[in-house]
Image (cartoon, rainbow, N blue to C red):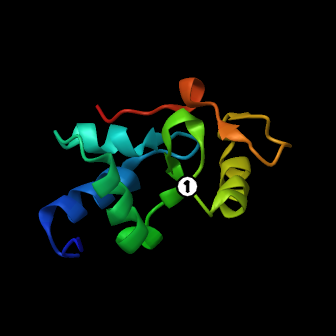
Amino acid sequence: MRIAPDGPFVTHVLDIVDSIPPGRVMTYGDVAAVLGSRGARVVGQVMSHYGSDVPWWRVIRAGGHPPLEHEARALAHYRAEGTPLLNALAPGYRVDYAAARWSPA
């Protein structure tokens, strides 16, 4: 399923992601929940297709894992922003989700 780039769901997802402050994160499911949806996978599709112009590294997988296949690029952003990390020196690092989680007001 391809999501229309000009659709309201895409716009809302990208607006939420763009509002996440530096050093903070949300999961794909968190973003979906803010929109009243359970569609974490759809949020992932939106980010995959249209998320390159927003801080994509601030949306993580469940368990604190960075976006799949973008771990090295994301790590540079996390370090620059001071995002709390677990096992920051190991290849399988994770974001400290409990410390870095953000929710829009």
> Residue at the location (55% across, 34% down)?
63
Tell me the quarter of the picture where residue 37 sits.
top left
Q: Position of residue 98 (x, y in %)?
A: 55, 23
Judge the density around disc 1: few (<14), some (14-19), many (≥20) Cα neighbours within 10 Å.
Answer: many
Residue 48 picture quarter: bottom left
Please give left or right for residue 52 compared with residue 7 in the image: right
Could you say whether the residue bearing mark 1 is in a helix, strand or loop? Answer: loop
Which residue is at 23% across, 76% downward? 5
Task: Kindly identify which residue carries mark 1.
Answer: 67
State whether residue 85 is above or below residue 8: above
Who is closer to the viewer here, 25 or 91?
91
Q: Is residue 76 above or below residue 1?
A: above
- Circle 1: residue type: Pro
Task: Tally the numbered discs.
Answer: 1
Going 63% across and 63% down the picture, which residue do you hit? 70
Query: In front: 19, or 73?
Result: 73
Give the answer, above or below, for where 86 lies relative to 35. above
Q: Residue 9: where, in percent of width, then height?
A: 18, 59
For the N terminus, the quadrant is bottom left
Viewed as shown, does residue 102 lie left or right of 6? Answer: right
Residue lying at the far top of the rendered structure: 98
Left or right of 1? Residue 49 is right
Tell me the quarter of the image containing the C terminus. Answer: top left
- Which residue is situated farthest in the front direction here? 1
Which x, y percent locates residue 77?
A: 66, 56
